[in-house]
């Protein structure tokens, strides 16, 4: 049996029944990770010795019938912007030194450690997670397992590729403008940006309250399980939400019957979506209706907030690098240097004007969700394009936000948003559908996504690197 092809839920069931062990699962996941390293480049480093030690401890607990928690023995990967105790967090940058004691876990990593997870390693990111594709001066280009000439997306591209390859069914990503949803859509996996504050974050992101931490998984059930583990308060994050009132895993059972779904194929004609993507999303929406949801084609009726997003995003980047010496600044990705320079010129009044746009958009979406439980859109208007580029060839845009108009608005509003793989284009590249709910209704997003997996529409298989 290829344990790398199993979800976390199926691994846990096998541990419980004694069909296989955490050590076997970890060994196979590490083998898959090593085999993919040169071609896909999903990992900054593998923590093999620690992983095997934790797997052996988990195996002993399962033999005693005393698992430590909800994900005991499950192989997990961590995006290299999140602290993992005992290992450097380099954030894709040559400006960060490996020296140091690295004594803390980020809050979601700490929760996973408490629940017995096995940490396989750290996954690649663009420098400081600044863009929607994954390449950096430190680690080079991360490629798409479906086609090695294409990008894995970003900024959680290494995590998306790792899950797609079967190198651990669970991964932690971060999302400041689509950075969980973009690579998850490109790599054919499930990705959830939870409500802001649902998963505590420490240290705080330079991009402020745009940045969310969330699950990247094989399916929605695994994401619900992971959110049950990591979605609890941590005293280091003063903006963290209280514990959720119930289990996200248990909420999956409620399905979509009776939910009011707004389907917006192009945000009111603002976005040109490729026909294969539009068709795949429309089929998934029709299935939601067949499953009992009330579906209406309509739009949330807001103009593109990209200028406000740029003001906040570029200002955060400038603040991040404010203290850098000229020598240290010269080590940065040229694109990051450029947006830092733009952000440094933003005035306080311009920043506050962008906050006003954000508040207006949040109010508009709050009123929208009085009428509709869910908003459904394509996740992206394109499938994975050439690796090593920030934008597709021939694009009129210079920055990654030009091809991600469905994702960053919902970082501004702090709403939960997920991407579900609902098909492929003519080249076999995955297509994602985005599901958005009102703040604090992560359960509705997960219920709708899970219903698509249960109905057999959503993709859930692993893939070996093309050409390997």
Image: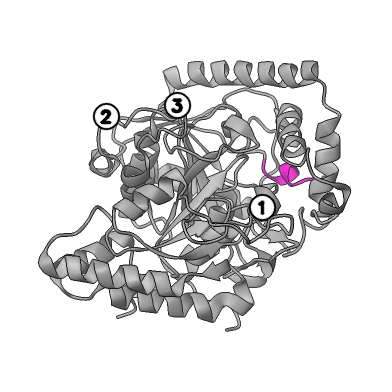
Q: Earlier in the sequence, mark 1 or mark 2?
A: 2
201 in relation to 120, above or below: above
Q: Is residue 290 magenta?
A: no
Is residue 68 left or right of 448 when viewed as pictured? left
Dot in front, 2 or 3: 2
Residue position for label 2: 245
305 in relation to 12, above or below: above
Residue position for label 1: 382
Which stretch did the figure color magenta? 398-404
Q: Position of residue 99 (x, y in %)?
A: 63, 60
State which quarter of the image contains the N terminus: bottom left
Find the distance from the CA under tag 1 to the CA under tag 3.
26 Å
Q: Residue at x 57, y 70 (%)?
A: 145
Check disc 3 and report its element: helix, strand or loop: loop
Q: Residue at x 81, y 58 (%)?
A: 393
Q: How dense is the environment of label 3, judged by Cα within 10 Å: few (below 14), some, or many (20 and up)?
A: many
Residue position for label 3: 438
Q: Is residue 369 visible?
A: yes
Quarter of the image for residue 310 reads top right
Check disc 2 and report its element: helix, strand or loop: loop
Q: Earlier in the sequence, mark 2 or mark 3?
A: 2
96 in relation to 313, above or below: below
Question: 213 or 369: which is nearer to us?
Answer: 213
Q: Is residue 403 magenta?
A: yes
Q: Is residue 424 visible?
A: no
């Amino acid at each position: 049996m290829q344990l790398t092809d199993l979800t976390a839920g199926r691994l846990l069931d096998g541990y419980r029944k004694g069909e296989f062990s955490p050590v076997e699962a970890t060994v196979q996941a590490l083998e898959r990770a090593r085999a993919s390293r040169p071609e896909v480049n999903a990992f900054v480093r593998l923590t093999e010795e620690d992983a095997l030690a934790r797997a052996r401890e988990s195996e002993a607990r399962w033999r005693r019938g005393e698992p430590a928690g909800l994900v005991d023995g499950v192989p997990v990967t961590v995006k290299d912007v999140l602290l993992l105790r005992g290992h450097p967090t380099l954030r894709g940058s040559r400006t960060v030194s490996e020296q140091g004691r690295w004594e803390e876990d980020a809050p979601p990593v700490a929760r996973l450690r408490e629940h017995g997870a096995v940490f396989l390693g750290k996954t690649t990111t663009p420098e400081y997670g600044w863009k929607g594709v994954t390449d950096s001066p430190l680690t080079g280009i991360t490629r798409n397992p479906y086609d090695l000439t294409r990008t894995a997306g970003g900024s959680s591209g290494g995590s998306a590729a790792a899950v797609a390859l079967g190198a651990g069914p669970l991964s932690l990503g971060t999302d400041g403008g689509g950075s969980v949803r973009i690579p998850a859509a490109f790599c054919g996996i499930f990705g959830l940006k939870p409500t802001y504050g649902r998963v505590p974050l420490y240290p705080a992101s330079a991009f402020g309250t745009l940045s969310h931490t969330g699950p990247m998984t094989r399916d929605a059930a695994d994401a619900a399980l992971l959110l049950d583990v990591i979605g609890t308060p941590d005293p280091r994050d003063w903006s963290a939400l209280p514990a959720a009132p119930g289990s996200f895993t248990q909420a999956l059972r409620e399905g979509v019957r009776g939910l009011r779904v707004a389907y917006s194929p192009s945000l009111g004609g603002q976005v040109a979506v490729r026909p294969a993507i539009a068709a795949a999303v429309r089929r998934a929406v029709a299935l939601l209706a067949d499953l009992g949801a009330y579906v209406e084609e309509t739009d949330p009726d807001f103009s593109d907030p990209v200028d406000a997003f740029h003001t906040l995003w570029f200002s955060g980047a400038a603040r991040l690098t404010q203290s850098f010496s000229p020598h240290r600044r010269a080590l940065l990705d040229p694109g990051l240097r450029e947006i830092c320079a733009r952000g440094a010129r933003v005035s306080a009044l311009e920043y506050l004007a962008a906050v006003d746009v954000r508040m207006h958009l949040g109010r508009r979406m709050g009123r929208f969700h009085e009428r509709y439980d869910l908003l459904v859109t394509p996740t992206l208007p394109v499938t994975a394009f050439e690796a090593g580029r920030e934008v597709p060839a021939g694009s009129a845009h210079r920055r990654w936000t030009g091809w991600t108009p469905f994702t960053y608005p919902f970082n501004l509003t702090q709403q939960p948003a997920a991407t579900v793989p609902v098909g492929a284009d003519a080249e076999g590249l995955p297509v994602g559908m985005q599901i958005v709910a009102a703040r604090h209704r992560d359960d509705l997003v997960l219920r709708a996504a899970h219903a698509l997996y249960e109905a057999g529409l959503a993709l859930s298989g692993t893939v070996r690197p093309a050409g390997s």
